Image (cartoon, grey):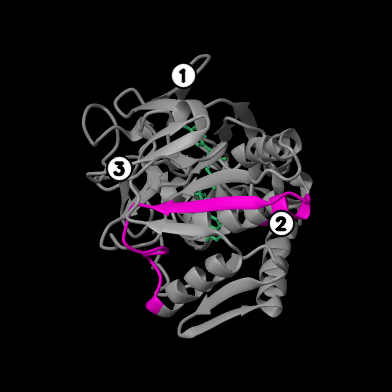
Amino acid sequence: MGGGHAHLFVLESLARDDWPAVEVTLVSPEPHHHYSGMVPGYLCGSYDEARLRFDLRALCTAAGARFRPGRAVALDLEARTLALEEGPSLPFDLVSFDIGSVPAALDTPGVREHAATVRPMSRAIELRERLDALIGRGAPEAPVEVAVVGAGAGGFEVALAMEARIRASGSTPRVRLLEAGPEPLAEFEPDVRRRTTRILSDRGVELRTGARVTAVRPDRVEVEGSPPINSSLTVWLAGAAAPPLFGRGDGAGPPTDEAGFLRVDRTLRAVGGVPVWGAGDCIALEGHPEMPRAGVYAVRQGPVLARNLRAALEGEEPESYSPQESFLSIMNTADGRALLRWKRLVSHSPPAWWLKDWIDRRFMRRFGLS
Ligand SMILES: Cc1cc2nc3c(=O)[nH]c(=O)nc-3n(C[C@H](O)[C@H](O)[C@H](O)COP(=O)(O)OP(=O)(O)OC[C@H]3O[C@@H](n4cnc5c(N)ncnc54)[C@H](O)[C@@H]3O)c2cc1C
């Protein structure tokens, strides 16, 4: 289920390695997977869409797997079937989930109706179209007012990418980055946070912390305890929630943590011996509640997942996955530079952007540009 990062490795292994006789179906709502690492670059115009798109159908063909368009909506472990949004259920002997997360707090009034999001990443196409339409609509001297809700790494990059795109069009950007917590990029060290605050302010992006958004309207954002903020386009990046299909560990579904993420052990298999595996944002790894939900983790899990699915079919011992303690983080600041953090090194520079671009393009090449 899902053509996320880790499943790209499973498809690669199916195409390359000697698996036992197995019938594989990949279910995905879309025939493409969009690579999140390049989404900010796409939004600001450094890449066109084809650059960040994996062709899941072509990868399935190479892997001898069937591609089934659709979305899994419920898992019945007793019957060993997956209900899909449309069409007959899918029976399985073994199932693996790499379906990512969903935007948190979607029930906030007006979010579903008016806000844009980039989860799944294919929604970035719609976001860029909406932004371009907005830029084209206003009088040239009128500022283009947009808001990004959620100042995590993704919100930081998206706010700067939108600022760059508006400015490059000749219009005046007025971008607000709204964060409910006391600081932006809470998952990063203080010196990274200081840098991000300075970068935002140098670019004229207004950062408001302690700003809890209570509603999104077509032309504004309502914030608890403050006057509304003008925004003709609001992007919702308020964190990652569990996909609803796992339920809450009750009923016939798989084991989950309290937030509804699939509970897996170090072999990436669901706890309790059920024939369910998982990787990426949709899992809660036992013993590592602090593991960040970032693509780099899904990527490292991919080869382990592939080997362990194969081992399960062959009756062999699985191997263990250990999350890396720290990871290289490079955020695109959409000005020909990127903000790099590696252990204690922090650098905002053009070489950081070249490095990010090189790493991302290399990843795309590995799985074939569509
Ligand atoms: C703007 C932005 C930039 C980011 N940049 C980076 C970065 O540079 N580096 C980094 O490490 N992380 C980055 N992240 C985080 C990263 O996007 C996620 O951690 C990563 O995409 C998770 O990968 P995944 O394989 O778990 O799932 P995803 O990449 O989310 O893929 C899941 C797939 O499953 C499909 N799917 C969903 N539900 C179902 C269903 N019910 N049935 C079938 N299929 C389904 C989806 O359509 C999707 O194709 C960024 C996030 C954002 C918002």
State the residue at coordinates (57%, 36%).
232
Q: Given the image, on which type of amino acid does mark 1 rest?
A: Ser
Distance from label 3 to label 1 (Cα)?
44 Å
Q: Name the residue under label 3.
A: 224
Query: Circle 3 sits in a helix, a strand or a loop, which is it?
Result: loop
Which residue ends up furthest to the front in the rendered image?
A: 141
Residue kind at label 3, given as amino acid type: Glu
Q: In 3D space, how far apart are the residues under numbered discs 3 and 2 (Cα atoms)?
A: 42 Å
Mark 2 surroundings: few (<14), some (14-19) or many (≥20) residues within 10 A:
some
Q: From the viewer's side, name the closer residue of 165 and 51.
A: 165
Q: Residue at x 47, y 61 (%)?
A: 297
**Which quadrant is home to the C terminus?**
top right
Say if disc 1 is inside 8 Å of ligand 1: no
Nearest-to-viewer mark from 3 and 2: 3
Is residue 272 shown above or below 361? above
Say whether residue 309 is magenta. no
Q: Does the magenta stretch include residue 178?
A: yes
In the rendered image, which residue does mark 1 sit on? Answer: 89
Return the residue at label 2: 364
Measuring from the top left, give residue 190's x and y in whole percent.
Answer: 38, 77
On screen, residue 93 versus residue 218, left or right, reads left
Earlier-in-chain disc, 3 versus 2: 3
User: Is residue 92 in view?
Assistant: no
Toward the viewer: 1 or 47? 47
Measured along the vertical axis of the image, is residue 276 above or below residue 159? above
Dot in front, 1 or 2: 2
Look at 36% across and 62% down and name the residue there. Answer: 291
> Does residue 223 appear to the left or right of 218 in the view shown?
left
Q: What range of the chain is rendered magenta?
A: 164-190
The secondary structure type at the circle numbered 1 is loop
Mark 1 to mark 2 CA distance (whole Å): 32 Å
